[in-house]
Amino acid sequence: MTVVVGSMCDTPSDARAGMSELDLLSAERRAALREAFARLPAKCQRLLALLIEDPQAPYAEISARLGVSVGSIGPNRGRCLDRLRRYPAIAALINAEPGSIAQRQGV
């Protein structure tokens, strides 16, 4: 596999060498989130996808599209986000964040 950077063609590892640390961390976070999202149950994927649409759909529309009550959207969203947070790659990133609760507690 090759990656085109500017007018040069490099291997992925060469492309990573030219990235800043911040860019690498950002790419790592996006990859971990995509992986974790893909492993969520389909109902969580659909709900979260609807909630992050821009502009966000009203809860009444989300309710109708998913066939769930409006009152269940918030609690289901919370459970889906908890599943994302517990995914090992995401949990590792959360715990590595400067000032995270785990770091403040010395975990």
Image (cartoon, rainbow, N blue to C red):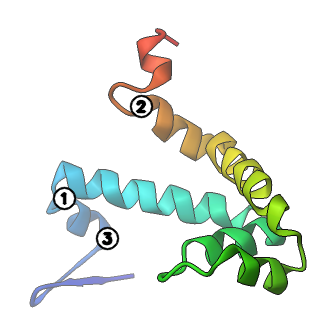
Residue at mark 3: 12
Instruction: Mark 3: give few (<14), some (14-19) or many (20+) Cα within 10 Å.
Output: few
The amino acid marked with disc number 3 is Pro
Q: How far apart are marks 2 and 3 (CA)?
A: 25 Å
Residue at horizontal 52 percent and vertical 36 percent from the top: 92
| Residue 36 spot, x, y in % from top left | 64, 57
Q: Secondary structure under badge 1?
A: helix
Nearer the observer: mark 2 or 3; the answer is 2
**Mark positioned earlier in the residue sequence (1 or 3):** 3
Residue at mark 1: 17
The amino acid marked with disc number 1 is Ala
Quadrant for residue 6, please give it.
bottom left
Task: Tell which of 2 and 37 is nearer to you.
Answer: 37
**12 with respect to 76 (left or right):** left
Residue at horizontal 68 percent and vertical 40 percent from the top: 86
| Residue 68 spot, x, y in % from top left | 89, 72
Residue ranking furthest to the bottom = 7
The amino acid marked with disc number 2 is Ala
Instruction: Mark 2: give few (<14), some (14-19) or many (20+) Cα within 10 Å.
Output: few
Which of the numbered marks, if any, corresponds to residue 96?
2
**12 with respect to 4 (left or right):** right
Q: Are marks 2 and 3 in contact (CB under 8 Å)?
A: no
Residue ranking furthest to the top = 106
Nearer the observer: mark 1 or 2; the answer is 2
| Residue 44 spot, x, y in % from top left | 76, 65
Q: Distance between the residues labelled 1 and 3?
A: 9 Å
Quadrant for residue 5, please give it.
bottom left
**Mark positioned earlier in the residue sequence (1 or 2):** 1
